[in-house]
Amino acid sequence: MLLGIDIGNSNIVLGVFDGAELRASWRVQTRILATTEEYEVLVAGLFGAARIDPSTIDGVALASVVPPLTAAFAELAQRMFHQPPLVVDAGVRTGVKIRYDSPRDVGADRVVNAAAVCSHYGAPACIIDFGTGTTFDAINAAGEYLGGAIAPGLEISLQALAGRTARLPNVELRPPPAAIGRNTVHAMQSGLVFGYVALVEGMVERFRAELGPGMRVIGTGGLADVIAAETTVIERIDPWLTLKGLRIVYDLNRAEPEQEPSS
């Protein structure tokens, strides 16, 4: 079985695949100062609760945008599963051509997401990842990664708004009863949630103008459901998109070791 690990700035997503089937998946908070030993205890607990024997893991695939934790989880893979992880970077085959000005600047999670969308949903596509930042990634009809856009995430926006103003509170990220808020909490929720809906709809319209009318729109990330519930432009939410991409990339590198990297 394969363990996929996606390390983000806010969350770490882990999943165990039995072939193509995602047997178990977890989303935990990123703790950048946690040690390998602390994460090992956490992962052991997750495996125990899911009744998965660590000895059945015969492969580990890792995508990370947090360099200190990349090393920590690489060590964890060796200690817990006796497997050197496949770390997705510029030297790994992904099956996705990168047309970015500097391909090395593209986060591993964004490339892995592109591989998953091309395989599961088709192209052209716009991938919207609602994480620490909200990223929009463009895949053309040939399945090539073109680039995209990066905006502050919902939680970052809320933290900045509440943290830099004396009279504005932290609020729950949920839609208010109406766009015109009649109290401070509803006014903030309107600006955050409905404002992000307008951002998403506007960016999707611009991406579609460049990629063509057949563009798919796939959402992922921890806050995707909040926005998707308020708009029709996101046609599918896939919370485990990056894990699926990691499985695809792992299989590609295991099956075709002699070929040159495509990204």
Image: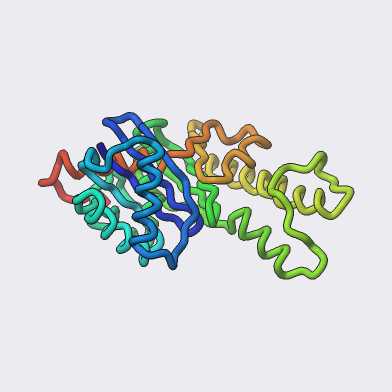
Residue 233 lies in quadrant: top right
How many numbered marks does the figure carry? 0
Left or right, residue 97 beside residue 222: left
Residue 244 lies in quadrant: top left
| Residue drawn at (40%, 54%) of the image | 7
Image x and y of residue 57, in percent: 24, 41
Left or right, residue 262 beside residue 244: left
| Residue drawn at (30%, 63%) of the image | 71
From this view, report whether residue 23 is shown above or below residue 149.
above
Colour treatment of the image: rainbow
Image x and y of residue 68, in percent: 36, 67
| Residue drawn at (32%, 37%) of the image | 52
From this view, report whether residue 111 is shown above or below residue 9.
above
Of residues 145 and 184, the one drawn nearer to the viewer in this rendering = 184
Left or right, residue 143 beside residue 86: right
Image x and y of residue 92, in percent: 23, 52
The answer to whether residue 104 is visible is no
Of residues 32 and 86, the one drawn nearer to the viewer in this rendering = 32
Of residues 41 and 155, the one drawn nearer to the viewer in this rendering = 41
Left or right, residue 182 beside residue 95: right
Image x and y of residue 192, in percent: 71, 51
Kindly give the residue lying farthest to the right in the view shown.
182
Kindly give the residue lying farthest to the left in the view shown.
258
| Residue drawn at (34%, 52%) of the image | 63
Locate the N terminus and report the quarter of the image it occupies: top left
The answer to whether residue 195 is visible is yes
